[in-house]
Image (cartoon, grey):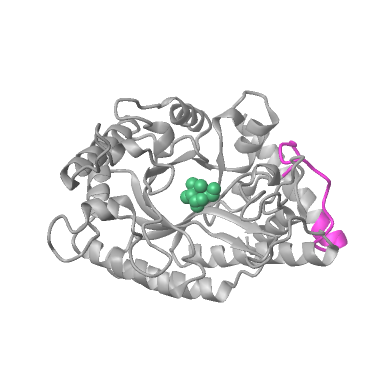
Amino acid sequence: MKLKRILSAVIAFAISATALTSCGSTSHPDLYAYDEEAPSLYEAFSEWFKVGTAMNTSDLVEGSEEMEILIKQYNVFTLENESKPENIHPSEDVYNFEALDKLVEFANEYDKTVRGHVLVWHSQCPDWFSYDDDGNTVSADVLIERMKEHITTIVSHYKGEVDVWDVVNEVLGDNGGLRDSMWYQIIGDYDGDGDKYDYIEIAFETAHEADPDARLIINDYSLESSEDKTITMYMMVKSMLEEGIPIDGIGLQMHIDIDFDAETCKNNVEILMRLKEIDPDFVIEITELDLSCYSWSDSSTDIELTDEFVEKFDSLYSDIFEMFIEFSEAGYLDSVVMWGYNDGMSWLNGYPVSGRVNYPLLIDRDYKLKSAYWSLIDLAASKS
Ligand code: GLA
């Protein structure tokens, strides 16, 4: 299997190099992502960072095109929905470990990394956490006990198997400061030290106790575009790191669109990376990358993929990965995870405009490699 993969990488590199030298950077063979002759995205970027995708356990059918794509193209995996609180722990006494167990088994067999997504979040979180049997909101003590038992049970179950955890997701609000979630409201300033980071601090401490070797991430959106949110994140994490809270990195979801501004992103990452002054091993991970073909203000449902548009889309992807290479070379970045491995499965179909068709990823609905994919392969070859 290993020899087969090395051979296919050599053939793919030769094809890509021939295409580059003979016809410029745009001519590439017409290949499916699972084809033997297709290059491997994660191998192409392996000297800088890991490359992963969100997926579902229904993709893990031996011999299927889906599973072949996952094995060939990526080396980090996140379950799109199956390990979120409402699925893995739907009621107090019920844990559903089957899905994440299946991913872990796959990862062990093929030497891949697993991201556990997500332990504490305001969304896709069942109501039982915050209500008692009479429908009353529980006290801070009860909620903390429930959260601790949730985290300890899950993280211990996967000790040494799940490499990275998104311990908390989207704890910042859109108007500055912490999100006004039920975790925040109920637990508040539990230790009386004047800040309300308490539920986050307890979550990280509990996860660290359950698996001291797992990388623990605080994950959020818009950190690539909002300097205010970035500064809020920086100040909060700085204060927690100074108190010894075991946070290993910040996850930038990076659900971006065609108006993406790389300069703002670089500036914000530089701000976050000042946290290395406190912990030299502190990193960022790109956790949910996709590139919507629509501007945020656009309400249309379909877009014509003209040559001009595709060229813009492809060069944007290429610029973004070039920026990731810079981050990696500065010691900032560990992995880049895409939020899906083909346009058909993307959550951006139908969001935020109902009925919308989107094309935000690197592989099309038929599993063909898009020109954006090839622009990344060319980029990696030119930088090696
Ligand atoms: C957020 C969550 C993900 C996923 C995406 C889009 O970013 O972190 O789990 O739900 O939205 O669907």
Looking at the rendered image, the quarter that the N terminus falls into is top right
> On screen, 367 above or below 319?
above
Residue farthest to the left?
192
**Is residue 376 found left or right of 276 in the rendered image?**
right
Q: For residue 104, what is the image quadrant? A: top left
> On screen, 307 above or below 142?
below
Residue 110 shows in the view: yes
Residue at left offset 34%, top offset 49%: 216
The part of the chain drawn in magenta is 19-38
Magenta span: predominant SS is loop
Residue 31 forms part of the magenta stretch: yes
Residue 352 forms part of the magenta stretch: no
Q: Position of residue 354 (x, y in %)?
A: 67, 51
Q: Position of residue 355 (x, y in %)?
A: 71, 49
**Is residue 267 found left or right of 72 in the rendered image?**
left
Looking at the rendered image, the quarter that the C terminus falls into is bottom right
Residue at left offset 50%, top offset 56%: 253
The residue closer to the viewer here, 345 or 300, is 300
- Say how many tags the image has: 0
**Is residue 351 found left or right of 77 in the rendered image?**
right
Residue at left offset 66%, top offset 62%: 317
Residue 51 shows in the view: no
Q: Position of residue 4 (x, y in %)?
A: 67, 32
